[in-house]
Amino acid sequence: MVHPTTTAERDARLINARHEDVNPNDIAVGVVIGRTSESFDFFVYAIASVIVFPKLFFPFVDPLMGTLYSFAIFALGFIARPIGTMIFTVVDRIYGKGVKLTIALFGLGTSTVAVAFIPGYETIGVASIWALTLFRIGQGLFLAGTWDGLASLLALNAPEKRGGWYAMVPQLGAPIGLLVASALFAFFVGNLGAEDFYDWGWRYPFYVAFAINVVALFARLRIVSTPEYTHLFETRELQPSPVFDTLRSQGAAIILGGFAPLASFALFHMVTVFPLSYVFLYTDEGPARFLIIEGVGAVFGIASVVLSGYLADRLGRRTLLAGSAVAIAAFSGFAPQLLDAGPAGETVFMITGFILLGLSFGQSSGALASHFQKGYRYTASALTSDLAWLFGAGFAPLAGLLLAANFGLIAAGGYLLSGAVVTLLALYFSRWEK
């Protein structure tokens, strides 16, 4: 089937005409840029969910309830992702990856930047909440469409005995995206008065998100339009298959793949969004300083993701994931209480949490591409990613804050513990190679 091409894809093909086959390092650059742009969009929204949306869209309730409402809408983006995968798999099969990526990335950027133009509740009432909900669902739907198979392509082209190293590369995008988003918000909330920040300052990072998506689109089309990628697509190494056919054939593996990294994905938002909400609500500390601490934690997270690649190639990916889950279980028993121990305790919590996150998250998707049947690998990997984010991360801020508010920080640690237990059970029942 000959797929129509977008103008951006044709431009990318012209650039590629000057190069030979794309090697794994070229693919890695495209993967990191793509994942960073996606993560930046979601973290900009996540940070605003804590320090902006409760005040702007839910002024009729107390700050705690407003934050819980905000987190409930936050979770809708993850619920929408599997639906988006169903929709964009059809687009991919009919029109090709170039068209799909163009629609998805422009849609993701538009959904994100549109949030910046929503008037507050005091201006248009409940319509502001409905608009926020609509654009959050849009983020989830379009993010699913940005699945391009580049992570799978990278894994398939990794040098022998370097699978763990190349598996960690796509995971670098999340802490990098968080670092940029935290720095932007820390700058505006720390340098603007409250009136200016809530009037216009919080909106600026959402504008930046759209520009980053445009850059990411071209970088990813640069890879997708290469002969190497096209060859893998045509030989069904990365062929989009119908969702229901994929579920019938690979359902058990998809479920195990979705639950196996649960400890990592639960920890993901328990060291990013949840602690920001707790500190913002229950301490006298301003958000700017904690966002800086979060940015420092993200730097440790980047280093730890890189370390995970080194360790996975020497210890085995499955061993590293299991060991990380045990460490996260231990972390859940004492670490959340550090958020009540002042800036020093918060810093220890964030750095320790990000180190554990990097080790586990760095390998959380590395085994997917090689454990699905070839004809279903592309779509099965996308569905597994959607389910992992939904089960592990989607409700983490809401559950963590709800538990902490009613039963104390130790109860929030129980959420992490449950994720670690599920990960160990999923690894036990899986057939992943060591």
Image: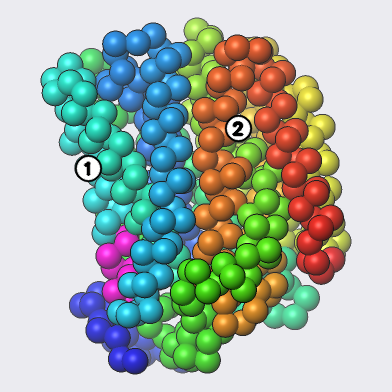
Residue pictured at 57% horizontal, 82% vertical: 375
Q: Choose between 248 and 151: the one closer to the eye.
A: 248
Secondary structure found at label 1: helix
The amino acid sitting under disc 1 is Ala
Question: Is residue 123 located in the magenta-colored stretch of the structure?
Answer: no
Find residue 121 and report its horizontal and vertical position in percent: 21, 20
Residue pictured at 68% horizontal, 65% vertical: 253
Binning the other alpha carbons within 10 Å of mark 2 as few (below 14), some (14 to 19) or many (20 upward) gives many
Binning the other alpha carbons within 10 Å of mark 1 as few (below 14), some (14 to 19) or many (20 upward) gives some
Q: Quadrant of residue 370?
A: bottom right
- Residue where numbered disc 1 is placed: 114
Q: Quadrant of residue 224?
A: bottom left
Label at residue 416: none
Earlier in the chain: of badge 1 and badge 2, it is 1
Question: Is residue 102 located in the magenta-colored stretch of the structure?
Answer: yes
Find residue 266 and report its horizontal and vertical position in percent: 63, 39
Relative height, residue 324 to residue 348 (above, below)? below
Q: Choose between 170 and 291: the one closer to the eye.
A: 170
Secondary structure found at label 2: helix
**Is there a contact, CB below 8 Å, between mark 1 and mark 2?**
no
Q: Which residues are magenta?
A: 98-105
- Residue where numbered disc 2 is placed: 270
Q: Choose between 316 and 329: the one closer to the eye.
A: 329
The amino acid sitting under disc 2 is Met
Q: Is residue 391 left or right of residue 52?
A: right
* Residue 59 in sight from this viewpoint: yes
Q: Quadrant of residue 154?
A: bottom right
Residue pictured at 35% horizontal, 48% vertical: 139
Find residue 213 and report its horizontal and vertical position in percent: 32, 57
Relative height, residue 273 to residue 406 (above, below)? below
Residue pictured at 68% horizontal, 51% vertical: 259
